Image (spheres, rainbow, N blue to C red):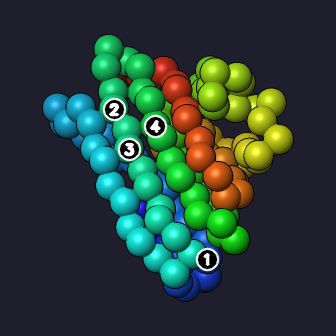
Amino acid sequence: INYDPAQPGFKHIILRPRPVGDLKFVKAWHKCSYGTISSSWKRDAGQFTFEATIPPNTTATVYVPASNAARVLESGQPANKSKALKFLRMEDGNAVYEAGSGHYSFCSTMLP
């Protein structure tokens, strides 16, 4: 969970999970003036699940570790079909999305 230096005060949030080493899960949250930002993820056998909550009146850039953006799901549906998400790019093994406020549940496959 990080703020965007161009939009201080968590008006725009950067959510970028960083699965490294043998770390299998992380849960984190931050209370800002807009509400609670939460991020939790876990990985198991190449599957990555990521839950994120973005408070009202904010936006976020969300990085989802994935081998291919076409294989990222959000709430069980292809993320590229979601009206709440805008696919931006693939970057360093992540599908990167622009997201509005709300709760998101991502699932993806990662490279080993």
Provide the residue designation for mark 3.
Answer: 40
Q: Nearer the viewer, residue 51 or 15?
A: 51
Q: Position of residue 36 (x, y in %)?
A: 47, 65
Q: Amino acid at mark 4?
A: Phe
Q: CA distance from mark 1 to mark 3?
A: 20 Å
Q: Position of residue 90 (x, y in %)?
A: 62, 41
Q: Which residue is mark 2?
A: 42
Disc nearer the start of the sequence (4/3): 3
Q: Residue furthest top?
A: 45
Q: Amino acid at mark 3?
A: Ser
Q: Is residue 30 above or below residue 47?
A: below
Q: Is residue 4 visible?
A: no
Distance from label 2 to label 1 (Cα)?
A: 26 Å
Crowdedness near tag 3: few (<14), some (14–19) or many (≥20) residues, C-alpha within 10 Å: some
**Labels 2 and 1: the sequence-earlier one:** 1
User: Can you say whether 3 is above or below 8 in the image?
Assistant: above
